[in-house]
Amino acid sequence: MRLSEPEQRLSLLLTELSSSTHLGVLSANLSRILEANDTFLDMVSCTREELRAGKVDWIAMTPREHIARDARALDELRSDGTCIPFEKDLILRDGTRLPILIGGVRTCSQPLEWTCWVLALRTEKEASAAA
């Protein structure tokens, strides 16, 4: 099956977005991260092998105080197909937190899957705290 011209442009744009060195891009479902670009894996200090083995778990990286906001984002994905970008932290392996800005779009309804973009905010937060 051949992609239409708009589908080809969209595919190219998604490829370019995924190759960003500043923006993490990932796809996920309710249990784990399915795919991610190198930028996101570097942000969270995980390897592609760990990702392929299903060991990159967005739920485990989410602090308790952000669970309710994540639940709202999932509700938005289900109902609207997109979630309003929001700030949250990810807990890294060493116990430190990485502040991020995250937004997403639904890519499949059943089972629920989505694609997110992630912007690390650590540099901005540190600069703001130092000012």
Image (cartoon, helix red, strand yellow):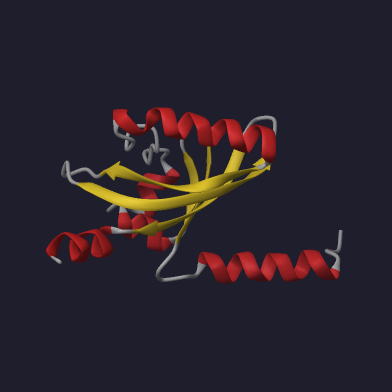
Compared with residue 64, is residue 123 higher up or lower down, i.e. above or below? below
- Count of number-bearing discs: 0
The percent coordinates of residue 6 (x first, y second) are 81, 67
Q: Is residue 40 visible?
A: yes
Residue drawn at (39%, 32%) of the image: 59
Q: Quadrant of the C terminus?
A: bottom left
The percent coordinates of residue 36 (x first, y second) are 47, 53
The percent coordinates of residue 101 (x first, y second) are 41, 53
The percent coordinates of residue 68 (x first, y second) are 42, 28
Compared with residue 50, is residue 37 higher up or lower down, i.e. above or below? below
- Quadrant position of residue 108: top right
Residue drawn at (61%, 38%) of the image: 77
125 left or right, relative to 48: left
Q: Is residue 30 visible?
A: no
- Quadrant position of residue 118: bottom left
Residue drawn at (40%, 62%) of the image: 38
Q: Residue furthest front?
A: 131
81 left or right, relative to 62: right
Q: Quadrant of the N terminus?
A: bottom right
Q: Residue furthest left?
A: 130
Q: Which residue is at the front of the view, 105 or 16?
A: 105
Compared with residue 20, is residue 81 higher up or lower down, i.e. above or below? above
36 left or right, relative to 129: right
